[in-house]
Image: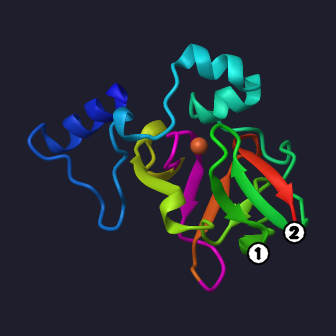
Amino acid sequence: MWKRISVCAALFGLAGCAAQPGVAQTPSRQQFSVVHSQEEWRKQLTPEQFQVLRQKGTERAFSGKYFDSHDVGQYFCAGCGQLLFSSKDKFDSGTGWPSFVRPAQEKSVLEVTDTSYGMERVEVECSSCGGHLGHVFQDGPKPTGLRYCINSASLDFKKQ
Ligand code: FE
């Protein structure tokens, strides 16, 4: 959070942290409905889940359990259980990460400007617990043209 604030402050000045049009800013920690300390998260999650969800890590391409899954069902947040994505919106992107054209519900995710690693990307977070899910890119297929590139480790699939 502090890193994000300081990056915004450096880029835009403290008076106005300008958001990209259509890109929601992460609410403050107090606004998430599911809040745990890092220690609590570490106990609750597997090491892979913790690294992705709470430390904004990225799993290796083609290493996760869902990138090649074609099962019908829904994907929930591995941190808090919120519904995030549906198999009907999943497509084979060839990237090695599960890819979706949209979230299951617009309110499920937050999209936040991410300027880490010298790139400008849009990070996708769970709107309930703030867990890092992945990024969204504008090179997806129709009908949305969006590619939600999501780490398997942040997801928990339930077959229909
Ligand atoms: Fe969550």
Crowd band around label 2 with a 10 angstrom C-alpha radius: few (<14), some (14–19), many (20+): some
Question: In which quadrant of the rendered view does residue 104 lie?
Answer: bottom right
Q: Tell whether label 2 touches label 1 (CB within 8 Å).
A: yes
Drawn side of residue 104 relative to residue 123, left or right = right
User: Farthest residue toward the left?
Assistant: 15
Q: Which mark is residue 96?
A: none
Crowd band around label 1 with a 10 angstrom C-alpha radius: few (<14), some (14–19), many (20+): some
Residue 44: x %, y % from top left: 70, 23
Q: CA distance from mark 1 to mark 2?
A: 7 Å
Q: Main secondary structure of the magenta part?
A: loop
Q: What segment carries the magenta color?
A: 126-143
Give the answer, above or below, for where 62 lies relative to 48.
Answer: below
Drawn side of residue 160 relative to residue 30, left or right = right
At x 56%, y 39%, the residue is: 131
Residue type at tag 1? Lys
User: Farthest residue toward the bottom?
Assistant: 143
Q: Nearer the viewer, residue 35 or 67?
A: 35
Q: Which residue is mark 1?
A: 88
Q: Which residue is mark 2?
A: 72
